Image (cartoon, helix red, strand yellow):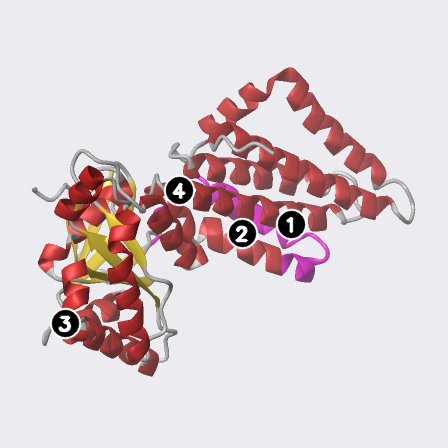
Amino acid sequence: MPDPQPDEHELVAPDEGAPRRDPAPSDDAWDELARVLERVPFVGTLKRDLARLSRLVYERRVPRLAFVANADAGVVAVLAALLDHQAQTSDLGAGWLAFDADGRRVDVVAVAPGPDAIEALRAAADAAAPDLVVVLATPDEVRAGLGHHLDALSSLLAGLTTAGDPPPAVLPLVVQPPSEVHVARATGASPRAVVAPARGAFERQLAEAGLVTLEPLALGLAEGLAPVGLEALAGRLVEALPETARVEAARAFPAAVEARRRVASDVVRASSMLAATVAVTPLPLADLAVLAPLQGIMVTTIAYLSGRPWDRRVALEWLGGLGVVGAAGFGLRWGAQQAAKLVPGMGMIVSGSVAGAGTLAVGRSAMAWFLRVSD
């Protein structure tokens, strides 16, 4: 498949090293929000919540996965299943490839276990540190012993640790070949039960090598049949990634339904806490410049997680879905919050509670609309 031509969504040029975050229409809104927050009292209290939201939303970037796998283990098939699409690839240099499925992207480096694996992994890591290492093997490879896989993995982790970087998480994955999936289907056996012995052997070999990894997973792939274990794999990948890569990963992997909802909940929770803290400022109307863009960024982030573009139109679509009654309800919450500030003593506490609860309600409404999440 020919490489796609660079376009406005291209995140990395081959000679630029580490992948960068894709500029988004929310950048202007985020910059304006940050400037306003600098003028709000209690900035010290805001820092933690703002930093969490910044990592999830503003600093977001494409996830980087390193695979240790032989050519016949099925890395491309695994990625096609995760992306639910046959992705286009482009060369990023130093062994890294971008897999792009209509704007849903993951950057990947894959090396075969063997004498050259260590240098290949180190060269790739020098260009861009992987977020997660996936050790991919077939049941036959596990039964025969995974010496080369484990040697390459041990050397990679030792090299990254020596360089002063925290080692990436390691996910062992057994890929059940199509023939075994079809046999299990024909005999009525559970595909999970068929692959369970190989997964257990994988775990024992890792433990004997002194390697600390995530719990091994199994994936069954066969043409014409739904992948077995895909949702568990997609969810584990999202949760194991750093916060800066979770939004893009949750969007990229359609099967990560629950993980996508958890990422959205994290965004809503951080936004609500930030709104409550900002609302404690004693000046009426002072937080209007913060809450509107904050809630707008929150809603567009949730829409983006669902696969929508990151722009104002999706927020208007959601607002139109609320109807007059819903929109009026959010307006009344804001009015009550401003009135509470005029009350001596407890007024600021009430105002903060109203702002936090109102932002939480906005976020839950957006999750119900875009992600079909019900309370």
The amino acid type, in three-letter code, at marker 3 is: Ala
Q: Position of residue 93 (x, y in %)?
A: 16, 60
- Magenta stretch containing residue 136, yes or no? no
Q: Secondary structure at mark 1?
A: helix
Image coords of residue 365 (percent x, y): 58, 31
- Secondary structure under tag 3 reads helix
Q: Which mark is residue 53?
A: 2
Q: Which image quadrant for residue 174?
A: bottom left
Regarding mark 4 in the picture, which secondary structure is present there? Answer: loop
Report crowding for label 4: few under 14, some 14 to 19, many 20 or more residues within 10 A (C-alpha): few
Q: Give the x, y percent position of residue 293.
A: 57, 39
Q: Residue at x 68, y 60 (%)?
A: 45
Task: State yes or no: residue 38 in magenta.
Answer: yes
Q: x, y (%) of residue 82?
A: 28, 44
Q: Nearer the viewer, residue 244 or 167?
A: 167
The residue to which callout 4 is attached is: 24
The answer to which of marks 2 and 4 sits earlier in the sequence is 4
**What range is drawn magenta here?**
18-47
| Mark-to-mark CA distance, 2 and 1 | 9 Å
Residue at 74% in and 38% down: 285
Between marks 2 and 4, how big is the CA–CA gap?
15 Å
Mark 4 or mark 3, earlier in chain: 4
